[in-house]
Image: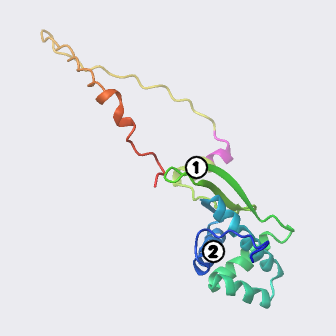
Amino acid sequence: MRHRKSRFRLNRFTSWRKSTLISLAKNLLIHQSIKTTKTKALAVRPLVEKLITLAKLNTLAAKRRAYKILSDHRQVKLLFDVIGERFSARKGGYTRIFNLGFRRGDNAKMVVLELTEIKKKERKLDKKEQEIKSAGEKSAPVVEEKPIEEKKPKTKAGVKEKPPVATKKSLKKFLGGVRGIFKKQRGSL
């Protein structure tokens, strides 16, 4: 009997379910934020929290236990060196879930699963942006630019200009805008 043996089965065999959860956990550790369904996010959350707790211990045995789950030395190194140090002061609650809405194809509830302390990447500045930033630090005087006036072309004396040709109005919408129904939305399947 299966009394009190509840878990997220994700409609998969055991091996498929384990590999799905491990794959989600690896991607969450690499990208720090992933978009997935709510049931998958709720299923992978305990695994990720367990891995981060192991990373806080930072012992050889903990690294071996993490490697048994992740099966990748680079990810174990990332987990222990970067993520473990980032969460060293926190006692729990390493992940959070934000609701996004429903997926268009199958109406599945979509969420964003992310680490609570995300390291933001600094983007590289272009040369113009660097100049502006350095000029702002020097506090250079602000010069106001005058708008440029448009010059009209000169016409020859005695030559009449042709009046502008009236363009035809755009054709009526096809069947009252029915084609708008069939347009694909961004992010669909």
Comparing 47 with 144, the one in front is 47
Question: What secondary structure is marked by label 2?
Answer: helix
Which residue is denoted by mark 2 in the rendering?
26
Q: Residue furthest front?
A: 1
Dot 2 amino acid type: Lys
User: Measuring 83% from the left and 81% from the top, which residue is drawn there?
Assistant: 57
Highlighted magenta segment, given as a residue range:
135-140
State the CA–CA distance, disc 1 to disc 2.
24 Å
The x, y position of residue 107, in whole percent, is: 55, 51
Q: Is residue 38 above or below residue 170?
A: below
Q: Is residue 12 above or below residue 108?
A: below
Dot 1 amino acid type: Phe
Q: Position of 52 compared to 137: left or right?
A: right
Residue 60 is marked as none
Lower position in the chain sequence, tag 1 or tag 2: 2
User: Measuring 26% from the left and 25% from the top, which residue is drawn there?
Assistant: 171
Question: What secondary structure is marked by label 1?
Answer: strand
The x, y position of residue 125, in whole percent, is: 57, 56
Q: Position of 68 compared to 161: left or right?
A: right
Which image quadrant for residue 27?
A: bottom right
Front tag of 1 and 2? 1
Which residue is denoted by mark 1 in the rendering?
102
Which image quadrant for residue 37?
A: bottom right
- Are there few (<14), some (14-19), or many (20+) residues within 10 Å of tag 1? few
Whether 168 is among the magenta residues is no
